[in-house]
Image (cartoon, rainbow, N blue to C red):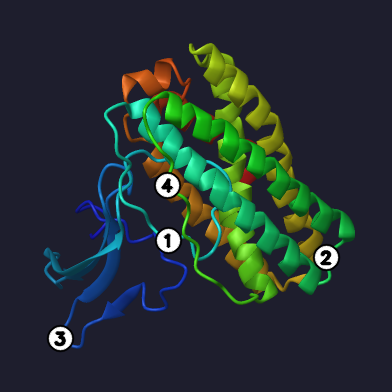
Amino acid sequence: MAFAAGYSPCLREPHRKDDGVVARPEGGFDVIAYTGSGCSEDVMRRTVRVAASGEVVAVKQEVARKASYECSIVGRRPAGLQEMANGSGEDARGRYFADVARLEAASIQAFLRLREELALHGADVALQDAALASAVDEVRHADITSRLARRFGAVPPPPSVADVPPRPLIEVLLDNAVEGCVRETYGALVAHHQALHAEDPEIREAMAVIAEDETRHAGLSWDINAWAAPKLSQAERDTLREARRQALAVLRAEVAVPLDARLTAEAGLPSPAVGLALLGSLEQELWA
């Protein structure tokens, strides 16, 4: 009933332990559900009361995640990444590349932390080295996209990342499932799309470089997943699969948000219809 009323009860925030459904003693249920894509509107966490009669009423709400100007599906977001205010500037291309540059810079820290945590949990040296090489790639990406942002009149804000202590292996793998196996994998495909379809030659050239690197980064995510699989219980493997499913649901909502026409034409970003088709192909080939 909550879903039919326009709420998303299947989305979860990884750090929340109280998401779900609670039966009320007097009848009916309280459902924790979400609305909003997080792109052009805030993601709202709502307590939705479903009465025994079927009536659905939202009785409480809070902002789960502030909206960003564009949904930049780029790079690996580190744990502890702080939300930033919407980008400034009149040009959508500048705002977009400023956000991309911030995320690319944040990815440097994400991969350096990943290398440390892989070493802590006894991962193969090859995986550790690949994480370090990915951090070096992200330095180049941040420089490339910062130049593009400034070309279109925007200044990329530096990322703010809170210190996070070393995490248990399952938390590292959950992060890898969401940020790597889903978001980075789709982001690599988008970068290849931009390298082929961007009308602006400088953007097209930049994305050709970034696409190759991001493809390797996505491959690293799946290599980490394969390395860890034998170490996990069936319940842990099910948890990773559910995390990928939820991340895909969030990503699908983000991809469906319309973009400024200059971003689809000059920057080569896929339209919502094309983006959903790309997601569908990955879901069939990798995430099924």
Q: Amino acid at mark 3?
A: Glu
Q: Which residue shows up at 42% across the image and 61% down it?
A: 82
Residue at the (56%, 73%) spot, across then down: 164
Q: Earlier in the sequence, mark 2 or mark 1?
A: 1
Inter-mark Cα distance, 2 to 1: 28 Å
- Which disc number belongs to residue 82? 1
How far is disc 3 from disc 1 in space, using C-alphas?
A: 41 Å
Would you name the residue on which mark 3 appears? 26
Tell me if 74 is positioned left or right of 170 in this view: left
The answer to which of 135 and 192 lies nearer the viewer is 135
Q: Amino acid at mark 2?
A: Ala
Disc ID at residue 123: 2
Can residue 288 be seen by looking at this rendering?
no
Q: What residue is rendered at 30% in x and 49% in y?
A: 67
Asked which quadrant contains residue 15, the reply is: bottom left
Residue 157, numbered label: 4
The reply, left or right, for residue 49 in relation to residue 238 is left
